[in-house]
Image: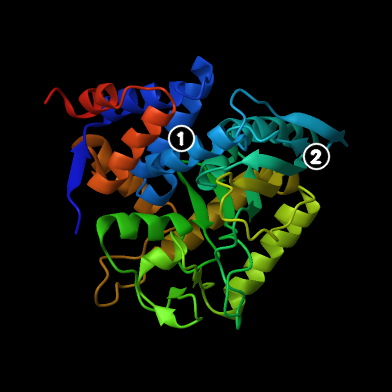
Amino acid sequence: MTDMLLIPLPRLREAMHLVVRGFGSCPDEVDAVAGNLIEANLTGHDSHGIGMLPRYADAYLQGGLKPNAAVSTELDGGALLRLNGNRGFGQVIGAQAMDLGIARARQHGTCVVALGNSHHLGRIGAWAEQAAAAGLVSIHFVNVISRGIVAPHGGGDARFGTNPFCAGVPLAGRAPVILDFATSMIAQGKTRVAMNKGELVDAGCLIDDQGRPTREPHFTVVPPWGALLTFGGHKGFGMALMCELLGGALASGMTQRDTDSSQKRVLNGMFSVLVDPGALADRAAFEAEALQWLDWVQASPPREGFDRVQIAGEPERAHKARRSAEGVPVDATTWQEILAAAGKLGVDPALVQATALGAA
């Protein structure tokens, strides 16, 4: 198992700002990209955190990621928006798309946002959180344009991406409920993290290049290629299919049919529905009913091996509180990959190292 570094949050922020500046990003984009990636680490989703920067650097150098790009509007139907992300940083494009959708949902009571051609949107929960902070319910179906990584139920090789689904519900007086999951058994980035840590993944998550069950994460990170499996068999496959049809075919006009592993860009399409609950029902009554139901569910006595019933979003908030105070763990292999990426971007790796960990 590889060594782990524990980096204080202020130092990590400063170091990651140095790296992201290497893309030529404007200051606001540096803040958005670094902030979003670190937030993923803070919430326990290391698969979507700073470990993505080496992939981003390669995508940028290949021309598949366009720094300082912005959303453009291809169709404005009032409560219907079709947007092009122009291969910009998803951390910026996602926020811009949600800003536009939020404004229209406040005006019309609802808005459907079809976003295509965005570079990696990162942790989709961030966009549900943005909508929830504006008092809106949101639902998101996302596809992935990259080398296929997930096998269809009953299939023996990879045919599509991890195709996440997300939903958020704001509630007065308490944190929102944020459901955010890949339709694969685990996120692709978790296999990268496991390989870098020298760990195996749980049984039932992967198949190897011959379609046989394996726990070795390298089959989804380096050749020979295997595949992730969908969660819940045909149920997860059905969700993945809907994410491809809605986030891909409908929202962006692009579905995953690419077997070229040399391309490092990760493009996302996202089909989002935003709803103002106050425009649809009595908001106070809705929230009272929702809160009573959540209290009822969480009053269930914990089963052996569990402390209590947790609602979607609670584990992430617990991770964030702990890591904000104690520092962010980063495995040594991932850290070396980040330093190498900094060098590719023209940023001194030694400066990044000293900024994050102090002088040797």
Where residue 302 sits, quadrant-wise, is bottom left
**Around disc 1, counting alpha carbons within 10 Å, would you say few (fewer than 14), some (14 to 19), or many (20 or more)?**
many
- Rendered location of residue 359, percent (x, y): 14, 22
Where residue 51 sits, quadrant-wise, is top left
Comparing 320 with 294, the one in front is 320
- Rendered location of residue 332, percent (x, y): 23, 45
Residue at 51% from the left image edge and 81% from the top image edge: 211
Q: Tag 2 or tag 1, which sits nearer the N-term? A: 1
Q: Are marks 1 and 2 in contact (CB under 8 Å)?
A: no
> In this rendering, is residue 83 above or below 1?
above
* Residue 59 located left or right of residue 299: right
Whether residue 87 is visible to the viewer of this picture, yes or no, is: yes
Q: Which mark is residue 36?
A: 1
Amino acid found under the numbered disc labelled 2: Arg
> Which color scheme is applied?
rainbow
Q: Which mark is residue 109?
A: none
Whether residue 133 is visible to the viewer of this picture, yes or no, is: no
Amino acid found under the numbered disc labelled 1: Asn
Quickly name the residue at label 2.
Answer: 82
* Secondary structure at numbered mark 2: strand
* Secondary structure at numbered mark 1: helix
